[in-house]
Image: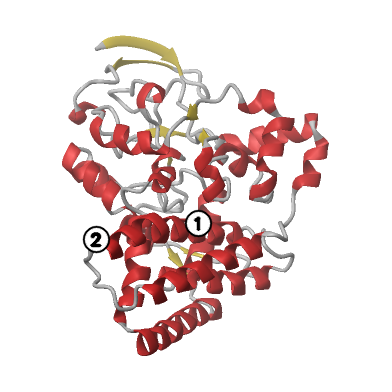
Amino acid sequence: MDSTTIKHRTSNETYTFNTPAADSSIELLNEFYWTKDTEPHVTRRKLILAKYPEVTKLTGHEPSSKWYASGVVLLQFAVAYYLRNTPVFSAKFIALAYVIGATANQALFLAIHELSHNLFFRKPFHNKIFAIFANLPIGIPYSASFQPYHQLHHKFLGDEYLDTDLPTRVEGLFLSNVFGKVFFACCQIFFYALRPMFITQIKFTYIHLLNIAVQVAVDYLMVSSWGWHTLSYFIMSSFLAGSLHPCAGHFIAEHYVLNENNKPRNANIVEGSNIGKLPEETYSYYGSLNKLTWNVGYHNEHHDFPYIAWSKLPQLRKIAAEFYDPLPQVNSWCGVIWWFCFNDINTLWNRVKRVGKQKHGHKVTQRLDMN
C-alpha cells in the first residue's frame, strides 16, 4: 500500500490514508465508491445547454416508437402461439425463447423505460396505458412499478436508499466472488425486480392495479385458449432477457466501474466519502446492439437529458461531441458480462454511492407526480 496525503475538497483539512492497488484482495476492496459530490449529469446538462441551446429542440416524444413496440408485442404473441404445443424444455422452445423471445422482451423492457419518461406520447396517461400493453409479453405486471423507481434512479442517482439500481451491502458481501458474480449475471432480472421492494416503498396507485388486472386477465385468456406453454414462453423470454444474453450486458455496463476505470479505493473512508478523484459513474456504449434496445447504450446522454427520445440521442452526442468523446466508453456488452464475472477487480462493490437522504433502516415512501 502507498501512503497518500491529500486535502479534503470541501473542508480543506488534510488527511493521510493508505491506498490499496486496484487488484488487491476482495476483503480490502469491499467498499463502494462513496462520495458527497453531486451527480455529474446535472452539471454537464447545464454546460451543454449554455453552449448549445438548440439541444432543447431535441426534447419530446418520438411518435414512431409506438409502432415499433406494437410490432414487438405482436411478434411475441405470434411466437407464443407457434410454440403452444412444443415442450417447454425442448431445444426448439429454449432456442426460440433465447434468440427471439429474450431479444424481444429486452426491447420491451426498454420500451417501458422510454415510456417511463413519457417519450412515446405527449400525455403521461397515454404513456402509462401503452406501457401496460407493452408489458403483456413480459408475463408479469411490471410497468407501473418501474416508472416511479426509475424516476428515483434519475433524481437521486447513487443515493443508497432511493436509487434501487444500486446493489446492497449484503449483495456485495456474498456475491463478489466468481460464483456469486456468475449467479448475479444469470439472475439479474430477479435482483432488479425484487431489490426495490426491500429498500424503498412507493405509493400503490390505480395504474398499478390496472397493470395487474390487465396482465392477469390476458395471461388467463391466453392459457385458457392456447395452453400453459404460451405463458411459459413469455416467462422464459423475460428471464433470459435479464440473464446471460448479449443485450442484458447493458444492465451492468451502464453504471458499474469496470476494468481500467476502477480506480484504487481508500483503505479508510473519511466521513463516509472516498476522498480523491472518483471514477465516472455512468458509461455509454455505441455499438450495434443499440439498434435492438432503443439506443439505451447512449447512457450518459440519456442521464444528461432524460426527456430526449432514443431516436435523437445520437444527434445529441454529435452536437455536444466534445463533452462525450473524452468520457470512458464500453465497447462490448458481451465483454462486460465476461469481464464482470471473471476479472477479480470487478465486483458488486464497483458502484458510486452517496449517503442516503433517509435515516438508515427506515423505509421510504416517495410520492411522485403521476399526472
Q: For numbered disc 2, what is the local secondary structure?
A: helix
Residue at point 79% right, 44% down? 56
Residue at point 47% right, 34% down? 281
How is this picture coloured?
Answer: secondary structure
Q: Quadrant of residue 241?
A: bottom left
What distance separates the C-alpha of mark 1 from that of mark 2? 23 Å
Residue beneath disc 2: 91
Is 308 or 232 nearer to us in this picture?
Answer: 232
Residue 64 visible in the picture:
yes
Residue at point 67% right, 33% down? 317
Residue 47 visible in the picture:
no
Locate the N terminus and report the quarter of the image it occupies.
Answer: top left
Residue beneath disc 1: 107
Q: Name the amino acid type tagged 1.
A: Ala
Q: Where does residue 184 sit, x and y in percent of width and height?
A: 26, 48
Q: Name the amino acid type tagged 2.
A: Ala
180 to the left or right of 256: left
Q: Which label number is shown at residue 309?
A: none
Q: Where does residue 17 sit, x and y in percent of width and height?
A: 31, 16
Q: Where does residue 20 sit, x and y in percent of width and height?
A: 27, 18
Q: Where does residue 344 sit, x and y in percent of width and height?
A: 23, 28
